[in-house]
Amino acid sequence: MTFYGVVDERFKSETDLFQLHIHRKEHINKLEKERCKGKLDIFIPRNWKMERYKYQEQLRRMLLSEIRWQANIIFSQRTMFYAKQYNIACERIELEARYRYLGKYFSEKKLVKYNPWIICAAPKRHVDYLVCHELSHFIHNDHSPAFWEMAERLYLGLDLKAPTSGHTIHQLRNELVQNKVLFLLMYWGRPSYLKSFFWNGLVKHKTPLIIPDYMESTDKRVKSGYYTTFAIRV
Ligand SMILES: [Zn+2]
């Protein structure tokens, strides 16, 4: 897969949770948008050369602010839905658009943080997988077999003690971490990395990317926290 730092009208997201389309439009001189829950249309002036850094940066800002609005609705709804099933003590979500960051839980704060870019590339089953993963950490502070069994039961809507194989949850996990579009978007969405695709205001051609190395890492600063994360090397 080749990506060299330019997002324009060729990019779209069409999942069962979110529809994003980018269009060209005549007679406008700045970005415009139309939004409703689950749907976003962005309009780029017809004559903008999207290989220019300044236009990518404007698009990045608008896209990020809009997907935060969308992701807040989606992640709040999905998280509260699953938390209620097993009475998990999670009361709120926050969004943090850090690169190398899908989700993280804070059990003492009754909080889960998610990366908003996820909704631009992941269908509902992957969003739900991540929600169930983070919520299961409120009970199991590790990635033990008991943790995975609980995550699967939660995802499948089973009784807390029901027998389960773990097959479904591992399959979902593998699908999500192989989502290259998601990882490239998160990369593009970080200002310093977006800049690295450009030279003198214009895009450099086809900077090779090596992605992704998926891992679960412990957060050293917060006791008992696990990131669901990945690494990118250029
Ligand atoms: Zn985890």
Image: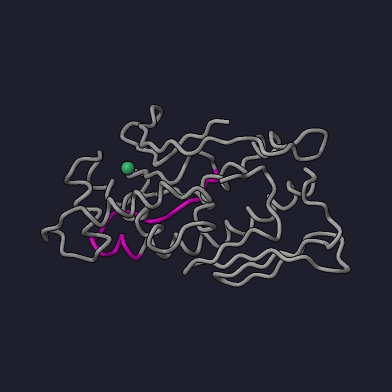
Residue 62 vs residue 181, the one in the foreground: 181
**Which residue is at 63% across, 52% downward?**
64
Percent x, y for residue 87? 25, 60
Q: Is residue 173 magenta?
A: no
The quadrant in which the C terminus is found is top right
Q: Quadrant of residue 19?
A: bottom right
**Which residue is at 61% across, 62% downward?**
12
Question: Which span is picked out in magenta?
Answer: 81-97
The answer to whether 142 is drawn above or below residue 37 in the figure is above
Percent x, y for residue 186? 56, 45
Q: Quadrant of residue 65?
A: bottom right
**Which residue is at 71% across, 36% downward?**
195
**Which residue is at 25% across, 57% downward?**
168
Please give left or right for residue 156 compared with residue 122 in the image.
left
Q: Is residue 88 magenta?
A: yes
Please give left or right for residue 164 compared with residue 86 in the image.
left
